[in-house]
């Protein structure tokens, strides 16, 4: 599997580290909404298809990336820097679900 | 100034090695720069940092990821978004950058004692490096001056092309000897000379 890092170009997946589900919305650290915290820690969509993920190019530029990977085919349909636009993407997903 | 000891010393054997009967196709050496500095810009401050690099080193960075430049004495290249490695044969590069790169622009980290610079040159340099790193070393994909971040067996390496068939590799000082030994082994079949 190749991931095309927006900085380094196409690189082998061995250079990357999976950093988890990209759909999670972290509650405010001061929040005492236990349901929201429970959902943040445990609830996962586990889709059979496109999945928003966070990866780090740990064996390269070390940037955190927002990756959409198909869980059935491993096809990567989009890669971008996590900084900046990921937060808005996660919010958009949350709004779509609501 | 106290002379810095090379971490490669016990394995640094000057001369020709390996299968060199038909000619030496690889030259290996340690460039021993006096200064190795890592520079990082805060988001949005990249242009100011690039201007500071030009002020201090006189080198203009080309646009684009991994862009770099070298004049044979000073070298600089991008290795990550907003991050650059600069090296100079002389000491004192970090002090020079500290005067120009203000805390509002970014950070300066002196890695002169933390990295070892190994130079691999010769007609088979691309071929030997391709055994180590799964990246395209062909000249159109990896132009002279450009830099790349990669890892070999989890040993992080920053590679700058400083000539058509010459690369400078910056590796962690503590891993430099084992990396050097691996590089020597990989060069054996084409014949290499340590200078």
Image (spheres, rainbow, N blue to C red):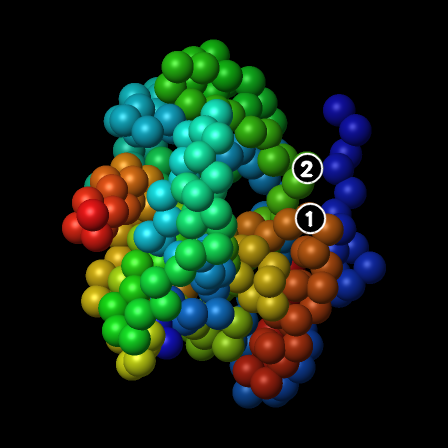
Q: Give the SS element for disc 1.
A: helix
Which quadrant is home to the N terminus of chain A? bottom left
Determine the image quadrant of residue A75.
bottom left
- The residue pinned by badge 2 equals B113
Residue at the left extreme of this rendering:
A96
> Residue, x 75% and y 24% (percent of image)?
B1
Query: Which disc is residue B173 wearing?
Result: 1
* Whether marks 2 and 1 lie on the same chain: yes
Q: Quadrant of residue B140?
A: bottom left
Q: Is residue B159 above or below residue B25?
A: above
Q: Earlier in the sequence, mark 2 or mark 1?
A: 2
Q: Are marks 2 and 1 in contact (CB under 8 Å)?
A: yes
Image location (x, y in percent) of residue B150:
47, 59
Task: Give the chain of mark 1.
Answer: B
Residue at screen point 42% across, 70% down:
A13
Q: Is residue A56 above or below residue B183?
A: above
Compute the Cα span from label 2 to label 1. 7 Å
Residue B172 appears at what percent x and percent y?
A: 64, 50
- Determine whether the residue tagged by mark 2 lies in a helix, strand or loop: loop
Residue at the spot 39% in from the left edge and 14% down from the top edge: B104
Return the x and y of residue A30 as percentages of the image width and height: 48, 25
The answer for which chain carries disc 2 is B
Left or right position of B117 against B143: right
Q: Nearer the viewer, residue A69 or B126?
A: A69
Q: Is residue B98 visible?
A: yes
């Amino acid at each position: 599997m190749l991931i095309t890092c927006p900085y380094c170009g196409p690189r082998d997946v061995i250079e990357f580290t999976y950093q988890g589900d990209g759909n999670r919305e972290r509650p405010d650290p001061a929040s005492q909404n236990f349901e929201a915290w429970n959902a943040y820690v445990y609830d996962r969509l586990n889709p059979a298809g496109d999945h928003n993920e966070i990866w780090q190019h740990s064996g390269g530029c070390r940037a955190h990336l927002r990756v959409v990977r198909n869980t059935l085919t491993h096809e990567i349909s989009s890669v971008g820097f996590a900084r900046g636009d990921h937060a808005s993407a996660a919010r958009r997903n949350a709004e779509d679900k609501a | 100034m106290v002379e810095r000891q090379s971490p490669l010393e016990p394995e640094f054997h000057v001369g020709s090695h390996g299968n060199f009967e038909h000619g030496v196709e690889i030259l290996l050496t340690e460039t021993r720069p006096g200064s190795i500095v890592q520079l990082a810009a805060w988001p949005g401050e990249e242009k100011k940092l690039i201007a500071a690099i030009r002020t201090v080193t006189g080198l203009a960075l080309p646009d684009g990821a991994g862009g770099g430049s070298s004049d044979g004495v000073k070298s600089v290249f991008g290795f990550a978004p907003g991050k650059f490695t600069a090296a100079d044969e002389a000491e004192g590069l970090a002090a020079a950058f500290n005067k120009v790169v203000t805390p509002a622009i970014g950070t300066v980290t002196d890695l002169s004692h933390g990295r070892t610079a190994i130079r691999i040159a010769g007609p088979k340099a691309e071929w030997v490096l391709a055994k180590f790193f799964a990246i395209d070393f062909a000249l159109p994909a990896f132009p002279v001056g450009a830099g790349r971040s990669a890892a070999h067996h989890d040993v992080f390496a920053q590679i700058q092309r400083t000539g058509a068939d010459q690369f400078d590799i910056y590796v962690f000082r503590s891993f430099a000897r084992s990396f050097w030994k691996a590089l020597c082994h990989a060069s054996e079949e084409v014949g290499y000379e340590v200078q």
